[in-house]
Amino acid sequence: MSIEIDILNGDASWPIAKALHQAVWGPHIAEKQPWGHVKWANADLRVLIETPEDGLVCHVGIYFRTVTWNGQKVHVGGIGGVCTREDRRNRGYATMAIDAAVHTMRANEAVRFALLFCEPHNVAFYQARSWLPFKGEVYCEQPEGRIRFDYMAPYVFNIVRAPTLGTIDLCGLPW
């Protein structure tokens, strides 16, 4: 079996990723979640994994942002919109896509750490891949203004550092 991993411009590749994303996180699922009303940032880049047999099987969005951590500006990479086709899960696709995303973030020398937000059922998955819980507060922008973002648990990955305490302001929409 051959696997193709592409890292593409976020906006330009949305038409490719949209059907998979909607199948996994579409309105019929999102509206039932505590985060269903959240306005999300668009990915800067997308990791897409395809197989000749199945087409697109996995997606990971990559985000680059200057945030504040304890009042200091810091450039971070983000991972969001992780989704794998339901009938192709548990085959390592998400791990490959996340690894490709982290590799891409490391190539951006300005990135100090990576940040993602996950639901309780995904905590063990990310912790097994060296993501650490961020135990501080996270703030972000929403149409109604700045809010504390506590709909999902924040996790950090060590690029140059991995802060696990303090306050992070995303200085924009969450991912």
Image (cartoon, grey):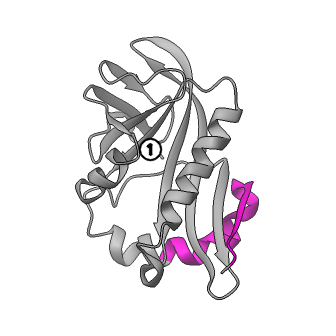
The three-letter amino acid code for the residue at tag 1 is Pro
68 vs 35, left or right, is right
- Note whether 11 is above or below 65 in the view shown: below
**Residue drawn at (46%, 31%), measured in percent from left and top?**
170
- Residue 58: quadrant of the picture: bottom right
- Note whether 36 is above or below 129 in the view shown: below
Residue at image mark 1: 143
**Residue 79 on the magenta segment:** no
Task: Looking at the picture, tell me which residue is in the foreground, 99 or 34.
Answer: 99
**Residue drawn at (43%, 75%), measured in percent from left and top?**
89
The secondary structure type at the circle numbered 1 is loop
Identify the residue at the far front of this view.
1
- Note whether 136 is above or below 78 in the view shown: above
Residue 156 x/y as whole percent: 41, 34
Task: Looking at the picture, tell me which residue is in the foreground, 81 or 30.
Answer: 81
- Residue 26: quadrant of the picture: bottom left
Q: Main secondary structure of the magenta part?
A: helix
Q: Which residues are magenta?
A: 2-22
Residue 131 x/y as whole percent: 38, 39
- Number of residue marks: 1
**Residue 18 on the magenta segment:** yes
Residue 74 visible in this rendered orientation of the protein = yes
